[in-house]
Image: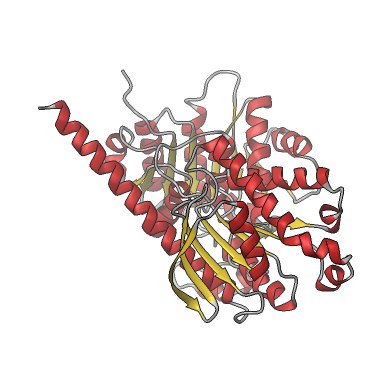
Amino acid sequence: MNSRVAQVLVIADDLTGANATGARFARSGHRVVTVAPEHVTRAAEDYDVVVANLDSRHMPAEQAVDLVTDVVEAVWPVGLVVKRIDTTLRGNIGAEVEAAWRALRDRCPPRTRPRVLLVPAFPSSGRTTAGGVQLLDGVPLDRTELALDPLSPATTGDVAEVFARQSGLAVRHVPVRQITRDLLAAELASGDEPVVLCDALTEPYLTELAQAAAQAHREHGIVWLAADPGPAGALLAEALRLRGRGHVAGPLLAVVGSASDLTRRQLDAVARTGPACFVDVDAEALEDRGFERRDELVRVLTDSLTSHVFPDVVILRLGVSAAGIAALPVGRRRVLPQVLAGLVVRAVENAQREAGPAGGPSGLFVTGGNVTSAVLDELGVHAFEVGGEVLPLAVHGVIVGGPLDGAPLVTKGGMVGDNAAVLECFGRLRRAVQARLRTVRSEVSEHFLFAVRDQHR
């Protein structure tokens, strides 16, 4: 009987990258472990995601190929194999990806098509792919300081060229296009090339790619090998519904009722730092009869709150400028806080209905006095247990009562702080969420320990 529980195998060529990729899966609720190749079989019996660190970046290609093949054989079967690659294309990329593809091909069921989803982009760290060229902060790799790397100097940013130096597998390039998910899935499935190289400029587009790839798997029998630095593989696992069994914190929820220039700059700083989903409340939703638009916003907000991989923070904000708000009739301006609060409450209720009491946001950020009062009132909060200041006029604490009872909360005045103020508030919230999560895990472990003891009495 096969006792393996692992759903995902990640093959990495260095320890730092291995752990970074593992962290993406851990955030989505998977139990993850990083091990040396000789320990993967045992790890597959206890963990959802096994990250094998081959430490092969500077190995001879032939030796790296043997390690990749052995690791796949030791852990198979799993729902997804991810070959972790470096964002700057260092190491035995072509040789290791081809070895993983061949190992996958040899083990796939009949009438399936093993293919490589090659997505080198990591947009939140400044690594993007455009026209098949890998860019660092918008500059091709060979025109950056990486060209002077003493061990692996970048001589080109052309991903297919770097890949072809070690592999004879044909590569098909898929640029970013504004097409439907059905068409993108069909494009990913078309052609006979074993490798599909995808451009990507933003984190949301990685999500679109992952969902289209999952659709191609279901409709066209594609069995994917994900070759990426971390984000795309984790998103593909989510899209393939490979769920973990660990405890996971949902995204942060920010409710922003200010449309000032300062707030815009603060949110721009958030957008540049990592995965964030912005849900804009436009003028139509503020109309007296904007019920259909509000229903649509609630659906978007709910979907974002129940996605465990992307985003890290969901931001409900006004999609109307300060001048646009000032031009609204007085009556509509007065009910604006209640409109935002109503969207929040409905989305939180939906998220908890779908994912249980622990579903929905793990922490709450609200800016603006009127909006804060409306949101807390609508959520049925009994009290705010004050913890201290994040910065002057930005306070952190804990929600008491209502569906988010016990969740950390940060409130901030609308015209408070510099451009990094919201980032500081989010950082404080994340630390509070992690502390709360550690407590939950400790309680679960203690409960399990006592249950085991009771069985042996």
Q: Quadrant of the C terminus?
A: top left
Residue at 81% across / 57% down in the picture? 282
Closer to us: 126 or 386: 386
Measured as percent of width and height from the top left, residue 207 is found at 64, 47
Closer to us: 291 or 94: 291
Residue at 77% across / 59% down in the picture? 335
Measured as percent of width and height from the top left, residue 76 is found at 40, 29
State whether residue 297 is above or below residue 397.
Answer: above
Examine the rendering and report whether any part of residue 135 can be seen: no
Measured as percent of width and height from the top left, residue 227 is found at 54, 46
Measured as percent of width and height from the top left, residue 201 is found at 69, 58
Closer to us: 350 or 275: 350
171 sits to left or right of 293: left
Examine the rendering and report whether any part of residue 423 can be seen: yes
265 sits to left or right of 180: left
Displayed quadrant of residue 32? top left
75 sits to left or right of 262: left
